[in-house]
Amino acid sequence: MNLSHLPFDTSRRFAAIRHALSLAGLPEEAAILDVGGHPGTFAQLVTEERPGWRCETVDTIADQFRGYTQASGAALPFEDGSFDAVVTSDTLEHVPAKERPAFLSELHRVSGSVVILGAPFHHPAVAAVEAHLDEAHVEHFGGHHPWLGEHRECGLPDLEETLADLNQGDGGVRLIGSAPLQSWLTWQWGHFFRKLNIRLDEAWAGCDSAQSSSPTVDFFTVHEDEIPFVPYRWVLLAGADDGFSRVPRIPKGDVDVALSHWFQSMCGLIASSGEAVVVAEINDRLARALASHQAERQGFWSSLKTLFK
């Protein structure tokens, strides 16, 4: 899949979804649905790379092109099990919170076996970085950033709740961390500078292409406490055991424990190693929280989530 012509952030989330699809064990001829994927770029790239796959796109935007259906992800106009896999990337955070259970239920309903969902989720560092960027957008461009504004209005999804909603089958849910927060923030700031100075356009295009085609791995498979970076985006893999056998799963009933392990590791990265280096304020808050909340691992997630939500 050639991603070099895409903006860096788009190419990274497409790469993460493609990586997840490669782990799913889909047949040579598979039907895939991309929910929220207008204008169909991912579907086009997938079918170019895998001619035996058919990939359709659903979104709420009025448009007409081959393989596109205008519909809400919370009410998909397809029969049960119509697709071998359903994917959705950076869409859940734009769905109003009250509609998310129906949205996730519909993904499961129309999928025969596999659901792959990528999105940013609520975490104090992610919230701080998004607030920082939105404030910068107001300062430099006179208004809120359009999609960061939607994140704020809808609220970033809760990872624990989303895992529970997706964990409907016997295979459990797997997690892949994607897009290091510091790299994502650096790219967004570069995009701001480009908009402020049109002379940067040519240089920016070259930088975008180089980063988008870079072989650097910017996603990781989660193994208990091994968190190499704080991710901006998580990719959730829900499906049969044989499909994602190489990715450790979160069994039903173990979500709280697993998330408390990983959240604690992420907090440690931010507070001690400066992963999110520009978010000094949140580092201080996390340091104070870590010092004052010496809870057991099972309670760590709940205490910090309550503190920062």
Image (cartoon, rainbow, N blue to C red):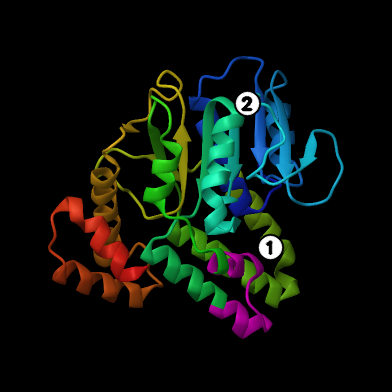
Query: x%, y% of residue 48?
Result: 73, 28
Residue 11, numbered label:
none
Residue drawn at x 53%, y 56% as measured from the top left? 98
Q: Residue 214: tell me if it is visible.
A: no
Whether residue 137 is in magenta: the answer is: yes
Q: Residue 10, percent across and down?
A: 62, 50
Quadrant of the image occupied by residue 65:
top right
| Residue occupying image coordinates x 53% and y 36% | 116
Q: Quadrant of residue 74?
A: top right
| Helix, strand or loop under label 2 | loop
What amino acid is at disc 2? Asp
Q: Quadrant of the C terminus?
A: bottom left
The answer to whether residue 3 is magenta is: no
Callout 2: few (<14), some (14-19), or many (20+) C-alpha neighbours within 10 Å? some
Give the position of the N terminus as an image quadrant. Answer: top right
Which residue is disc 2 drawn over?
80
Judge from the rendering whether residue 21 lies leftward or rightward of residue 177; answer left or right. Answer: right
**Residues drawn in magenta:** 135-152
- Mark 2 to mark 1 CA distance (whole Å): 48 Å
Q: Residues within 10 Å of mark 1 (few under 14, many from 20)?
A: few
Q: Nearer the viewer, mark 2 or mark 1?
A: 2
The residue drawn where x is 30% and y is 56% is 266
Amino acid type assigned to the residue bearing label 1 in the image: Ala
**Residue 13, image x, y percentages:** 56, 46
Q: Main secondary structure of the magenta part?
A: helix
Residue depicted at x 43% and y 25%: 244
Q: Nearer the viewer, residue 199 or 293?
A: 293
Helix, strand, or loop for circle 1? helix
Residue 245, picture quadrant? top left
Q: Which residue is mark 1?
A: 203
Location of residue 118 with respect to 113 vertically, above or below: below
Compared to 281, does 163 lie above or below? Answer: above
